[in-house]
Image (cartoon, grey):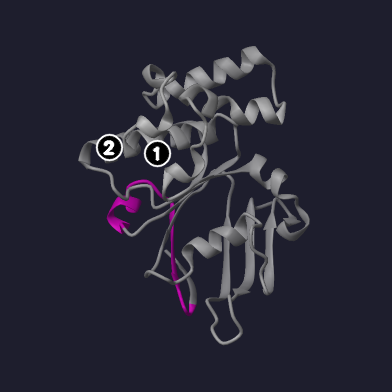
Amino acid sequence: MSFYIIDSLAFSYNKNTSLLKNISFVIEKNQHIGLIGENGCGKTTLIKLMLGILKPQKGTILLEGQNVRDIPLSQIGCKIGYVFQNPEKQLFCPTVWEQMSFSFIYGNEIDNQDMEDRINYYLDLFELEKYKNDSPMKLSRGEKQRLALASVLSRNVDYLIMDEPTIGLDILRKKQLEKCLLTLKSEKKGFMIISHEPNFLEKYVDKLLILSSKGVEVI
């Protein structure tokens, strides 16, 4: 069974304009997907539909065989990690450590030792350990982005979606992001990246989706 099945999807914000129509594609659990398209073509809207935040007007979205309409948002959040285009939108705790531990504490997922082991692993992986007692707001954009990635991945989600992760990154920070993506691939974690940089995507994805007013072209 495929991880995601999107079949004949259509969505619009008003009756006079059709933003998404005839959208069909399949994603496997460990697959690495790139999503590109012109500004305003509906890339972020498509992701919101996949996450169950928005509901399609036509068509279906299946996550592990179950219609996303019927899955609670909290359950989708346990399976799919989403990293915003602006990482500050998901950083809200007083310290880096509290940011990392928030979902564990309020989700009652695992015991304290497992929580600490997992958090320390991802802080080390993303080179953030030295900042664990600092405010997330004091970090650079690249560090904030890595923290957002680390906090999502520490929850052991099945799949990761990143919205424009290269925006605002200099060459060094982009190299660090590339290192993170390679690590995810080595850990057999699947991901989707929304980007305006097809040359960047080509290095790290197995399949490229080009979104347009006509639908989705799969390369």
Residue corresponding to mark 2: 173
Tag 1 residue: 145
Please indicate, yes or no, whether residue 180 appears anywhere in the rendered image.
no
User: Which region shows up in magenta?
Assistant: 197-214
Q: Amino acid at mark 2?
A: Arg
Q: Position of residue 85 (x, y in %)?
A: 42, 51
Comes first in the chain, label 1 or label 2: 1
Give above or below for 15 relative to 182: below
Q: At x 27% / y 37%, what residue is drawn?
A: 173
The residue under the point 69% across, 21% down is 110
Task: Determine the residue positioned at 65% across, 53% down.
Answer: 2
Q: Position of residue 145 (x, y in %)?
A: 40, 39
Left or right of 134, for residue 101: right
Q: Is residue 52 visible?
A: yes
- Please tell me in which quadrant of the rendered image residue 136 appears: top left
**As displayed, is residue 129 above or below residue 57?**
above
Give the image quarter of residue 179: top left
Looking at the image, the residue that sits furthest to the bottom is: 16
